[in-house]
Structure formats: structure tokens, C-alpha cells
Image: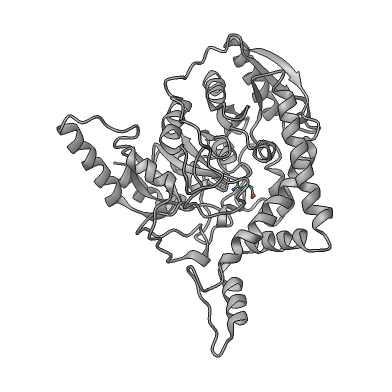
Amino acid sequence: AFNANVAAAQDALNAFIVATPEKAIEAAQAVDAMRARGEPLGKMGGVPIGMKDLFATAGVQTTAASHMLEGFVPQYESTVSAKLWEAGAGMLGKLNLDQFAMGSSNETSFFGNVVSPWKRNDGGNAALAPGGSSGGSSAAIAARLCPAATGTDTGGSIRQPAAFTGITGIKPTYGRCSRWGVVAFASSLDQAGPMARDVTDCAIMLEAMAGFDPKDSTSLDLPVPEWEAGLNADLTGKTVGIPREYRMDGMDADVLKSWEDGIAWLKDAGAKIVDISLPHTRYALPAYYIIAPAEASSNLARYDGVRYGLRDLPEGAGLQDMYAATREAGFGAEVKRRILIGTYVLSAGYYDAYYTQAQKVRTLIARDFEAAFEQCDVIVAPTAPSAAFALGENIDDPLSMYLNDVFAVPASLAGLPAMSVPAGLNREGLPLGLQVIGRAFDEQGVLNAGLAIE
Ligand code: GLN
């Protein structure tokens, strides 16, 4: 049934880059056989999922939604996807995304934008952005093409698309899920996580995805907690912090209202609400847009026409010409913009002024959170400053696109677990999301507060 839905919705939504119906069937048959033998099923036994096309899948094209990797078929499997197959999940296909996970609307994909299944209630027919970069994942779940999907979050790419499409997604603590086999964007920020219909499904899937991996040097060597068993929406004895600096001048009235509703639901669940301050919040976005492109410019140096995917070798050309021609043809405009910003802020004359300064700001932001978590157990704020915008609305204005990440990037810079849960509709009938940020390693606290909100 899911395979049929994926095929039927492809023209309208463009959520998948490649469909792999035979993989989903294979997993379902394996589960049937296990059931017949009376064997216990894995955590994800028989569940068909979508795989963001940033995870390397052995024998299945992996593109990062870039022309640069079109036709690239890895011989190896990412650790996270391998764990999901091990837990019994089956793959419906590879999901569309922003090119190299750079974007907030899924419009930077080489394979065309994804369309959100949501419409405004104004009778118009404006096509809306599913958010990004995990826009294929969010649209596919919202349209019920799959019950769950993987996402990755460098600066909000699980949380913002979840908020835009009325689903749930959690970015765990940096290091919980292995980055091995995930196409690198900004290595000190990249983190995989589950996207699903609700908090319980996210808890189940995160258990299957997480765990120490010696192949990733920043992987956390900690046991995976039983998050599903630990779910509890009773917040008696818990304190929720509301960050003053996230309440911005001119904030969307519906976003503010959903935040206030969320606070009321948390109170009903027994939580104590306190005001907190994260004084360096306003510097998070500029710091992120220095650090992430800096790391990207280094990570993307490997696409040179020699090792992976595309090779553009003009007649009679030398090595340098091949590099230039390949990178000119292979990378999209947003990727080139990030590489240019990254190489600029890392260049000899500007390194201290930009890159070192941004790293100092990153430390101050992490300290803000440490201080705040002496007063509260979790922090709750909006996921994004607005509901989904129309496709085309921001794509020619990078700064307004980047502003979408304003509430998401602080937790990314601090490496903290953060989740988006649906929190009502705005006046246009579009979903809004609330973000729960927790202490490092406290995914359970985040999931439980999310459960109280959903
Ligand atoms: N929108 C952010 C960016 O473009 C975040 C992307 C992400 O988390 N992968 O960098």
C-alpha cells in the first residue's frame, strides 16, 4: 500500500528521488518469515521508511540531491541505515532534499523542489514549501507516503521541515547517531535523527538509529537508553524554561499564540514554567553562517571529478581545468555560495576576524545553555518564525531564507538535543511547530515534554 502511495504522489509532490519498492517488499517478507518461525521482531520490524538521500545506501544511487553525485552508487551502507535495516525496517526509496542539505525550503535540489501536501485555507492554490533541507522526508510523512523517515539536522533541517508539515522530528545530542556514510555538510554540526507522525514513533526509531560507532570519531560511546519505555507525559517536578530572547519584535501573532498555548499545556502536565535568558541568541545565526560554510568548503573539496560522481573533462583539458569544469557544472548556486563564503572566512587575512570569532561566539552560546539548564530541565520556544511559505517566495533572497533558521541554530551550535512537535494551526490553516531543547544526552526529557505538548 505504501509503495502504491509513493508512486501515485510522485508527480504532485516530488518527494522521492528514487523509489525502491522491492526493498520494502523484501523487508516485509523477511518479517513474515520471522513471524512464522516465532522469532521476535526488531524494533522497526516490517516498517517501511523513507531514507533521506544523504545516507549512503549500498547498491542504490545516493546523490545528496546534487548533479555532482548523480549516478553515484555507493558500495557501502551508512551506519544509521544499516542499523535501521538490522532492526527490520524496509526502504521505500531515497528522499529528495536541498542540495548537500543546504537550504530551508527544498528548492536547491538538482531534482526539483518538493511540494508540501498542505494548502492554505484561503481557497487559493499556492504551492507551499515543505521546509528544508529534509523536505522530501517531511512531505512524504505528512502525505502518509511513509510512516517515518530519516532526516539530518545541521542547523534545523529536521525541526523546521517537521514544523512546516505538522509532523514530529528530533535531532538528538551531537554524536548519538553515527555520521559514517552520511554525506558531510558541516561535520561539527551534522546529526541524523528520526522524523515521524508523533513522539512515540520518533522514540522507537531513534532507538534503532542511535549508538556508538568506532567508524565516527565523534560518536558518543554511551549505551542507547530505552526512550520508548521511558515516555511519560506527566511533567510533575519538571521545570520548563521560556527564553526571553526568542520573543522578538514584530513576531508573527499566530506563532506567539501557539507558544502561549504550549506553555499552558505544559503547565497542565504539571510542569513549572520559568523565564530564562540566553543572552547571546542574536549572534547564533551569523556564527552559524560562518562556521557551517567554512566546514562545507573543506568537506566539499573532495568533489573534484576524480573520486566521485560527475567528471567534466573538456577536450585537451588539464587537471585544473577538469576540477573547474566539474565543480562549475556539478554544484548548484547555493552550494557555490556556501563554498565561497567558507573559503573567504577561512582565508589567511580573515580567519581571525570571522572564523575564530564565530568559534568564540559558539562557546558563549553553549555556556548560555549550560547556565539556563541550572534553572530548568528543558527549554520551549517556537521552531520557526513563521508557518510554511510559498515556493519561490524566498529563494532569490538568501538572507531572508537564512533568517528562517534563527530559532533552530542555537541548539545546533551547542550540540544539544532538540525536537519539533506540532502545536496547532495558524489562521491560514497551516501547521506550527514548537521546539523543545534539552540538556546534552537528555533526549528523554525532550521526548517527554514533546509528549505533553502533542
Ligand atoms: N537551513 C540551514 C542551512 O541551510 C540548515 C540546513 C541543515 O540543517 N542541513 O544551512
**Residue 331's spot in the image, x, y percent?**
59, 66
Q: Dividing the picture into quarters, in which one does residue 293 lie? A: bottom right
Q: Tell me: residue 3, above or below residue 441.
A: below
**Residue 224's spot in the image, x, y percent?**
46, 30
Q: Dividing the picture into quarters, in which one does residue 84 lie? A: top left
Q: At 34% across and 32% down in the image, what residue appears?
A: 43
**Left or right side of 236 for 8:** left
Q: Tell me: residue 187, above or below residue 425.
A: below
Chosen colour scheme: one colour
Viewer-side residue, 78 vs 198: 78
**Left or right side of 368 for 382:** left
Viewer-side residue, 120 vs 394: 394
Q: At 47% across and 19% down in the image, what residue appears?
A: 231
Q: Tell me: residue 371, above or below residue 393.
A: above
Viewer-side residue, 58 vs 223: 223
Q: Is residue 287 visible?
A: yes
